[in-house]
Amino acid sequence: MTETGKYKDTVNLPKTNFDMRANAIKREPEIQKFWAENNIYSQLAENNPGELFILHDGPPYANGQLHIGHALNKILKDIINRYHLLQGRKIRYVPGWDCHGLPIELKVLQNMKQAERQNLTPLQLRQKAKEFALKTVDEQRESFKRYGIWGDWENPYLTLKPEYEAAQIGVFGEMFLKGYIYRGLKPVHWSPSSKTALAEAELEYPEGHVSRSIYAAFPVVKVAEGLKASLDGFLPDLGVAVWTTTPWTIPGNLAVAVNGTLEYAVVEVSRRDAEARRECRYLIVAAELVDRLAGVLDCELTVKAKFSGQDLEGTTYRHPLFDRESLVVVGGDYITTESGTGLVHTAPGHGQEDYIVGQRYGLPILAPVDDSGNFTDEAGKFSGLNVLGEGNQAIIDALSEAGSLLKEEAYPHKYPYDWRTKKPTIFRATEQWFASVAGFREEALKAISSVRWIPAQGENRITPMIAERSDWCISRQRSWGVPIPVFYDEATGEVLLNADTINHVQAIFAEKGSDAWWELSVEELLPETYRHNGKTYRRGTDTMDVWFDSGSSWAAVAKQRPELRYPADMYLEGSDQHRGWFQSSLLTSVAVNGIAPYKTVLTHGFVLDENGRKMSKSVGNVVDPQLMIQGGTNQKQQPAYGADVLRLWVSSVDYSGDVRLGGNIIKQLADVRNKIRNTARFLLGSLHDFDPQKDAVAFDDLPDLDKYMLHRIREVFNEVTDAFDSFQFFRFFQTVQNFCVVDLSNFYLDVAKDRLYISSADAFRRRSCQTVLQIALENLARAIAPVLCHTAEDIWQFIPYETQYKSVFQAGWVQVDDKWDNPELAEFWKTLRRIRGDVNKVLEQARTEKLIGSSLEAIALIYLSDEKLRTAIEPLNVSGNGIDELRYLFLTSNVQLLDTPETLKGLKTLRVQGEDNWDIGVVNAADYEHDGKSYQKCDRCWNYSPHVGESAEHPLLCERCIPALAGEF
């Protein structure tokens, strides 16, 4: 053959039907269907030979569409579960939903007209709330499945199911019988906008809240015995100065508290304005604050006497707005000189510390505020005014009129808001049910220290929360929830709650669900012994805090379902759950069983946009996971990336802090996914005629380059395994990306093309390369499977030779051999790769200067100043095995190792000084001669050789291609 281009059909190009494009919108659902039809998940989950691993699902709330935070959370769980499956372990993943509570109730009410709402019975509301929750569960379930999440989707746990509610009543009952649950009048966070008590986890503290703070003077009536001699002379013009950011709590004032260890002073107030005459002339304040208060109150303060806080105990003062006298009491170290006056206005019905001090001094609990946040008749002339609105102003005006107001000023600070209605809360004493954390606090702290926290600072977050936690208010004044199973004596109000009543109600709920509390008569809800005992009972109307609902899941799910176990191996949620589900689960589990419900807790941060801002619909920076997967109406602007790009993003971020996502990041991740696909596509195509059973080359027979590559493969996939074992998925992402791009595409596959394309099909140099490619391909598919589950399965389905596994997930985890470990060989090839990198730089310069086109048009000239290195490399520059040769490594037609760098001077070359003392130049092969023969381009392999034209039969071919056609190279 003498016609150019006739040999192209003799080249072994890759062959595969594996698509270069992911086409995820079509392909991913097909793969999910394949998994479902072949029961891949359930078979592995149940039949794997390894130990059981239980990741217990924290229930998302069933009241709306999923957002990107849900995606981050569920995909992290799925990555971990799939990794355990690939490792041969059994897993049981039961997804769950939180179905009770105010947000669902509000959604239902918002969709109704006012008249409808007013006529709604509790049962009707509960029915509508249940329908809404179940509809949301179905919608969210389909989205989660589309993310590629494996689990028991047909049998999830729902907090509204009878078996769940009954187990929850069981937890409540055991805590009550142990003495941990009681009813009491205590101040709690109250939401006027929701008309219910709230737990700490149901609060948020938005930026930008500004309170109206006041300094006020309460006139002293009588000083304590020990101070009479020194302070009586200041009466009747003496007052105690207080500061508060909640003026509306002044009607509830029953004491002023001081710190017994602080020093206090009587100061004379000198003010020039006429109003000052109506105020106390002398004030008691913390001595340390005198100078600061002079500036705040814009007056002169002259110290007249000093004494300790303890000495003030027993002093009495008159309330400026009500006809009552109250005591100065000694509070705790919460009274500081960081702000205010050093004396704290104390209203036992409106503050936690106030309540504790009040209990110590036997003070009544006064909270003259109703469910809507309006003053009651106990507040006298302020009755009916809203405390967060006109009521606050009315108190300030009244204090001013009474001559008690010293100063009013704006005070920006963090203030609790209802996380659902986004409106401010108040602290208000009401009759509620509480769990006494004090009863099992030490056990809870001990349990925390037995858990593995990832990241480790999770332990530091939850420990002080438990150590400082006040009693947990578990009752809510709503209809949509699990009722607190309590009865009250109609005549006396006495509580009826004991083992018999709890067990009876629990059995009813197990059969009929908690609707029975409203459907059945009180008589039917009571055990037989209480039905005719001469007393009449009414049922309680409070429901349980939803955190008690979800916090009981260890009992209702992990412990109750036979396929699961308690404690679970892992809980995994956002970092906000240290004060939410992690905590409520811990408290209930420790209270009942004395142990944590989890062995490991992993937490992740929140998702921000690319600029680190919070995602917000109004700003327009929200990433909708469903839109990212399916694409928008305009596919050019909003392409369908598929679930795997979303999953790849989850693996790429350091979830231990807040993470970022936006359009540019998504595009970059799609590029990475495509690079991995393209690498896999080349591997698949290059193995189209390879049968591992008969074509694989034994390890000992492999050339050095292939042995080095197996060393590298072992290194890479051990690193990937370690990344998964330590839950550092970003290390997996970086390692796999680097392996595909740097080790395979840019190096090994680049070098391998000559062997794969040019050699005869069955040649040793080709089969040895395919042996490595097969190992790389299968391990790559296995390694990406926990994250890029669809891509991995897609790759596996296109493997061209027989495998014993239908699915990549049946194939198990990566398989590497310790005999591949060869650090000495690896060091040598690292050096060769560095030289190759510098040769590439020179080739690029030569291309820029039009000296060459393709790298095969070049002959590389290299001078190595290191004698030891030169000796090691020289064998690679003689005609050897057709693999471990410099010309193939550098993709040039020839390489000359020079005796002296001077040789480079007389040639048309470019030079670069490498960092390891080598000089490199290139020359165009057409300008180069070998033994008087010029280099010609081979029409088949495109290498330049002085031997082209020597064959009469194939005058256009080189000395390699002629035997290759005969099956000998």
Image (tube, rainbow, N blue to C red):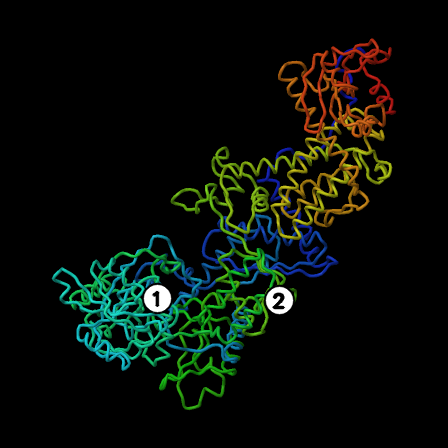
Q: Position of residue 479 (x, y in %)?
A: 40, 68
The residue shown at (78%, 44%) is: 803
Residue 579, image x, y percentages: 48, 62
Q: Which of 745 and 673 is in front in this view?
A: 745
Q: Residue 482 or 188: which is nearer the viewer?
A: 188
Q: Which residue lies furthest to the bottom in this view?
A: 534
Residue 857 point in image, percent of width and height: 72, 16
| Disc on res. 372 | none
Work out whether residue 773 can be spotted: no
Q: In this view, does 46 lie to the left or right of 112?
A: right
Provide the residue designation for mark 1.
195
In the displayed structure, does residue 409 sit left or right of residue 550?
left
Q: Mark 2 points at which residue?
A: 567
Check disc 1: other Cα within 10 Å, few if <14, some if 14-19, many if 20+.
Answer: some
Q: Is residue 340 above or below residue 175?
A: above
Q: Label 2 neighbourhood size at 10 Å, few (<14), some (14-19), many (20+)?
A: some
Question: In the shown orientation, is residue 273 left or right of residue 12?
Answer: left
Q: Can residue 755 be seen in this view?
A: yes
